[in-house]
Image (tube, rainbow, N blue to C red):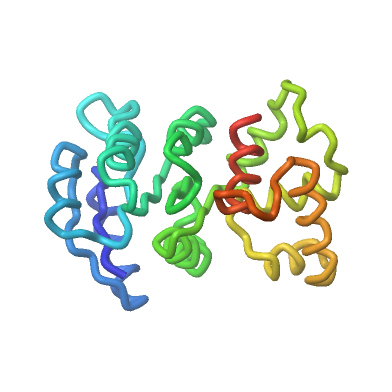
């Protein structure tokens, strides 16, 4: 996996470089600000770009805006955003271009090295990786009624885990149920959300979008 990193903290930037290298991945560029991001991605064509939300000069949302712009001009580029805090708006902005090849993790997750690497690899491979805290807060603050209201508590639990980017097997392990039980729950979710088997888009992605956009 070839990676571009955009992180203003020298310690975290160098730490990510070494961590990725230890797991056999190549960091092709490491930037201290977001100004040259699009040019760097255009030049290096990385499999994944890791971006800090808060970057110079104002340390507000420069990194997030750069990530959104990158997904606009290069939709095939996988983007994993790191944030110090949970900001649901940032997650929604990232999802505006779709739920594939995108992730949003809290920086503290980097300490769980195996999980962080797994999330990075999943996003680079075309999947999603949303921090459990982000998903949980978006769920708690949901006030709008929709098709999601027809889901059972267990179905919402399964959909929440799907929104984190977990596979069926990982969901089954987390809920201590069989793979078949998870498949049955997901089938019911698709049905209640009106996602037909011949849906043009990927039903799993559309279900996650329904969840994250509605909350």
* Rendered residue at 83%/61% (across/down): 184
Q: Is residue 149 left or right of residue 68?
A: right
Q: Position of residue 140 (x, y in %)?
A: 72, 31
Q: 201 or 173: which is nearer to us?
A: 201
In the picture, residue 139 is in which quadrant?
top right
67 in relation to 17, above or below: above
- Image coordinates of residue 94 in percent, x first then y, are 43, 37
Residue under the point 30% across and 62% down: 47
**Front-most of 92 and 209?**
209
- Residue positioned 24% across, 70% down in the render: 26
* Residue at the (76%, 35%) spot, across then down: 148
Relative vertical location of residue 127 with respect to residue 19 in this rendering, above or below? above
Query: Where's the C terminus, which quadrant?
Result: top right
Measured from the top left, where is residue 101 in percent x and y?
43, 53
Give the quarter of the figure containing the N terminus. bottom left
196 displayed left or right of 19: right
User: In this view of the protein, which residue sits in the foreground, 180 or 112?
Assistant: 180
The residue nearer to you, when weighing 147 against 69, is 147
- When asked about the image quadrant of residue 22, the answer is bottom left
In the rendered image, residue 56, in percent from the top left (x then y), is placed at 22, 32
Rendered position, 58 above or below 91? above
Determine whether, in the image, residue 146 is placed left or right of residue 34.
right
């Amino acid at each position: 996996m070839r990676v571009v990193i955009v992180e203003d903290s020298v310690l975290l930037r160098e730490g990510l470089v070494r961590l990725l290298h230890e797991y056999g991945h190549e960091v092709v560029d490491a930037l201290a600000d977001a100004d040259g991001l699009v040019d760097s991605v255009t030049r290096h064509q990385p499999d994944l770009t890791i971006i800090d939300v808060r970057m110079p000069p104002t340390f507000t949302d420069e990194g997030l805006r750069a990530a959104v712009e990158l997904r606009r001009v290069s939709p095939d580029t996988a983007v994993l955003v790191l944030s110090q805090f949970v900001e649901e708006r940032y997650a929604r902005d990232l999802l505006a271009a779709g739920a594939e090849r995108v992730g949003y993790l809290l920086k503290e997750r980097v300490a769980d090295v195996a999980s962080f690497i797994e999330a990075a690899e999943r996003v680079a491979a075309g999947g999603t990786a949303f921090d459990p805290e982000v998903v949980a807060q978006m769920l708690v603050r949901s006030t709008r009624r929709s098709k999601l209201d027809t889901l059972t508590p267990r179905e919402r639990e399964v959909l929440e885990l799907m929104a984190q980017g977990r596979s069926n097997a990982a969901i089954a392990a987390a809920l201590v149920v069989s793979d078949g039980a998870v498949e049955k729950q997901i089938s019911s979710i698709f049905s209640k959300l009106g996602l037909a088997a011949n849906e043009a888009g990927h039903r799993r992605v559309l279900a996650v979008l329904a969840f994250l956009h509605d909350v």
